[in-house]
Image (cartoon, rainbow, N blue to C red):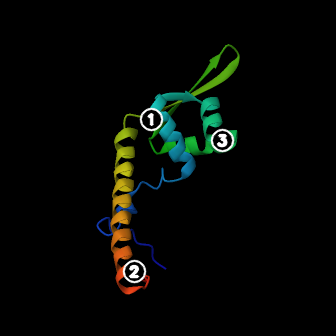
Amino acid sequence: MSHTKPDPEKHPLSDIDQMIHAPARLMMLSYLYVVESADYVFLMRQTGLTWGNLSTHLTKLEEAGYVEIEKEFRGKKPHTTVSLTNEAAPRSATTRRACERCSTTCRNEKGRCGALVRRTGRVPQG
């Protein structure tokens, strides 16, 4: 079975960045976009993720170039801060625009399908 990437002209979400479509990663990026940087404790409390899940997702985002992770000691305690990279905002904006296009497409399709149902009394298939 072959997997082909959908044509962006046919569906607006076909060009969404797969790295950030996961809800946990999208949540983290959304918080970081607002606060610019945060420590692990803040992100863990805001997202409800466990320490291990948070660490795994942030590592993936770091490897993909979305976040920068800085580790230091405050006194004798380790402290980790996460911030967005300069490349993250434009890449996130592309995803946001894709979601907006998808919403518009869905609203338009809903209107067309609703008119068809009212006119014919049948729900379109496929």
- What crowding class fits label 3: few (fewer than 14 Cα within 10 Å), some (14-19), or many (20 or more)? few
Q: Residue furthest left?
A: 9
Residue 18 is situated, as x and y percent measured from the top left of the image, at 46, 56
Disc 2 target residue: 117
Give the residue drawn at x 49%, y 34%.
32
Disc 1 target residue: 33
Confirm whether residue 71 shows in the render: yes
- What crowding class fits label 2: few (fewer than 14 Cα within 10 Å), some (14-19), or many (20 or more)? few
Residue 35 is situated, as x and y percent measured from the top left of the image, at 48, 29
Q: What kind of element bears circle 2? A: helix
Residue 92 is situated, as x and y percent measured from the top left of the image, at 39, 45
Give the residue drawn at x 50%, y 28%.
37
Identify the mark at residue 48; answer none if there is no mark. 3
Numbered disc total:
3
Q: Are marks 1 and 3 in contact (CB under 8 Å)?
A: no
Residue flagged by tag 3: what amino acid is it? Answer: Gly
Precedes in sequence: disc 2 or disc 1: 1
Residue flagged by tag 2: what amino acid is it? Answer: Val
